[in-house]
Amino acid sequence: MSRIPLSRLSVAAATAATAVLLTAVPAAAHTEVEADKAQALAENVTVSFHAEAESDTSGIKEVRVVLPEGIAPADVTYGKGPEGWKFTAVKDGYRVGGKELKTGESAEYSVVVRQLPDADQVAFKTLQTYGDGHVDRWIELDQNGDNPAPTLKLKASAPGAKPVAPSASADENPAPVDPAPATG
């Protein structure tokens, strides 16, 4: 039986720790997205969102989402969410909101998308508004950024899947999304 000197063991442990740190995955968005059928061109897909509450002084009162290319606001319907919250389609996406949630309570809701686009992934730029007016902006398309947009990775489309004709857009003209990152 051979013995490994303590200094060699320490070097091995340090090397392993460094390898873990160098291969660590970037931090996830604080608003996350998942789907029951995360596949390109899938139809009638329930897309669920989890907007993490990050304020110590106020609750979330609204979540605004800019839809990715290939999904029209008219092709999205409200699934379920916090009690009393309502869904409103806007020109480039939708809003869900209502009574301010309790401080520290995350907003979880779902929408149903008529058809996902033919893409590898789709990003849902998200603005999360609190009762005190503070806005968290999860809008960066670079997943290594400080405020990455929630992104849904899609599997390749099923054989024979075809795009459906897009629906008409909503009439409301919301204010454009401010690309400045959240402060805090």
Image (cartoon, rainbow, N blue to C red):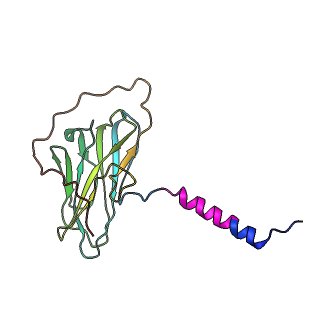
Reply yes or no: does residue 23 show up in magenta. yes
User: Which residue ends up furthest to the top in the rendered image?
Assistant: 160
- Name the residue: 36% across, 50% down: 142
**Span shown in magenta:** 12-25
Where is the N terminus found, in terms of image quarters? Answer: bottom right
Dominant secondary structure of the residues highlighted in magenta in the image: helix
Can you give x and y, in whole percent of width and height, for residue 24 in the image?
52, 58
Left or right: 108 in relation to 12: left
Left or right: 106 in relation to 11: left
Can you give x and y, in whole percent of width and height, for residue 98 in the image?
18, 62
Foreground pick, 99 / 169: 169
Judge whether 1 appears above or below 89 on screen.
Answer: below
- Name the residue: 41% across, 23% down: 160
Foreground pick, 116 / 1: 1
Q: Quadrant of residue 46?
A: top left
Reply yes or no: does residue 64 show up in magenta. no
Can you give x and y, in whole percent of width and height, for residue 53 in the image?
31, 67
Can you give x and y, in whole percent of width and height, for residue 92 in the image?
18, 44
